[in-house]
Image (cartoon, rainbow, N blue to C red):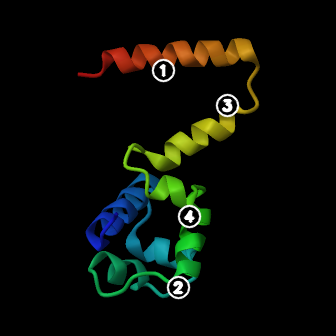
Amino acid sequence: MWDQRQFIDRLMQLQEESQLSSQKLSYHLGHGPSYINNIINGKNLPTMKNFFEMCDFFKITPGIFFSPEETAPIHSQKLIRVSRDLRADQLDHLIAIMEDLGRCQP
């Protein structure tokens, strides 16, 4: 079960991954300039409707938002979307590259 701190941490991660300031993210979500800061500071939580709008904006599902295994949700979902158009041989190359990258990590 996630608590408010985990929610805030994930939102901050998504904000950083999207390279948007809190003010710009607030505007992109259709709110005033302090909307995201108020969430990050623990003053407010988004409504369910606003949470789903956040997920739509970041192009992730609510399940991905709450998945602790997702280390870079926006990028991983973009990779999945892009890979859908690849042929099997291209996917084999991509998988080989990704496996090689995984071996390079400390």
Residue at 39 percent of width and 72 percent of height: 22
Task: Give the image location of residue 45, x and y in percent.
Answer: 39, 82
Q: Quadrant of residue 49?
A: bottom right
Q: Amino acid at mark 4?
A: Cys
- Name which of mark 1 and mark 2 comes first in the sequence: 2
The label number, if any, that marks residue 55 in the structure image? 4
Q: Is residue 65 left or right of residue 30?
A: left
Q: Is residue 62 left or right of residue 81?
A: left
Work out whether 34 lies above or below 96: below
The label number, if any, that marks residue 31 in the structure image? 2
Density class for disc 4 (Cα within 10 Å; few <14, some 14-19, many ≥20) is some
Residue where numbered disc 1 is placed: 98
The label number, if any, that marks residue 83 in the structure image? 3
Task: Give the image location of residue 51, x and y in percent.
Answer: 52, 74
Work out whether 14 lies above or below 71: below
- Name which of mark 1 and mark 4 comes first in the sequence: 4
Task: Give the image location of residue 90, x and y in percent.
Answer: 69, 16
Work out whether 8 lies above or below 85: below
Work out which quarter of the rendered image holds the N terminus and state it: bottom left
Density class for disc 3 (Cα within 10 Å; few <14, some 14-19, many ≥20) is some
Q: Is residue 65 left or right of residue 3?
A: right
Residue at 52 percent of width and 85 percent of height: 31
- Name which of mark 3 and mark 2 comes first in the sequence: 2
At mark 1, the secondary structure is helix
